[in-house]
Amino acid sequence: MTVPEPSDSIPDFLLEQFGDLSPELLRDVGDYARKDTYIAPDGMPDSMKESFALQDDDTLAAIADYADELAVFLEERDADSLEAITGGPNDEEEKWGHKRILEWHGG
């Protein structure tokens, strides 16, 4: 399985916040985006919480799907976050996977 590709309807500023979320938190974010729960999960970035209020239902559904797909991807690799696989922004050298993700996200 390759890194899930996000929907074009998900704003870039939101996608940037998915990199350091754990699979468990991603699942909780997906539930919150689907409005399965009305309490934002602990550890969810405040800017993400606030921006959800500005998104339409289709975008929230796309966010929920992407969060779930990314959680499965990370769990299959026993990874704590996407940055754990691709390398964080403080790495001296960008890894191939991180470069690809930036290309996919238009960065």
Image (cartoon, rainbow, N blue to C red):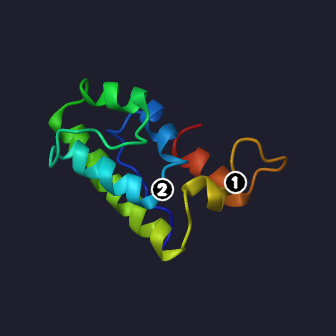
Q: Position of residue 61 (x, y in %)?
A: 21, 46
- Judged by depth in the image, the label closer to the viewer, 2 or 1, is 2
Q: Residue at x 41, y 26 (%)?
A: 47
Residue at 76% of width from left, 42% of height from top?
A: 90
Q: Residues within 10 Å of mark 1 (few under 14, many from 20)?
A: some
SS at circle 2: loop
Sequence-wise, the earlier of marks 2 and 1 is 2
Give the number of the disc on residue 74. Answer: none
Q: Secondary structure at mark 1?
A: loop
Task: Using the image as rendered, state which of residue 9 and residue 94 is in the foreground.
Answer: 94
* Residue 51 x, y percent position in the rendering: 33, 26
Q: Quadrant of residue 4?
A: bottom left
- Identify the disc placed on residue 87: 1
Where on the picture, by quarter, is residue 68?
Answer: bottom left
104 to the left or right of 36: right
Q: Which residue is mark 2?
A: 22
Q: Quadrant of residue 41?
A: top left
Question: Dividing the image into 4 quarters, which one contains the C terminus?
Answer: top right
Instruction: Identify the amino acid type marked 1.
Output: Gly
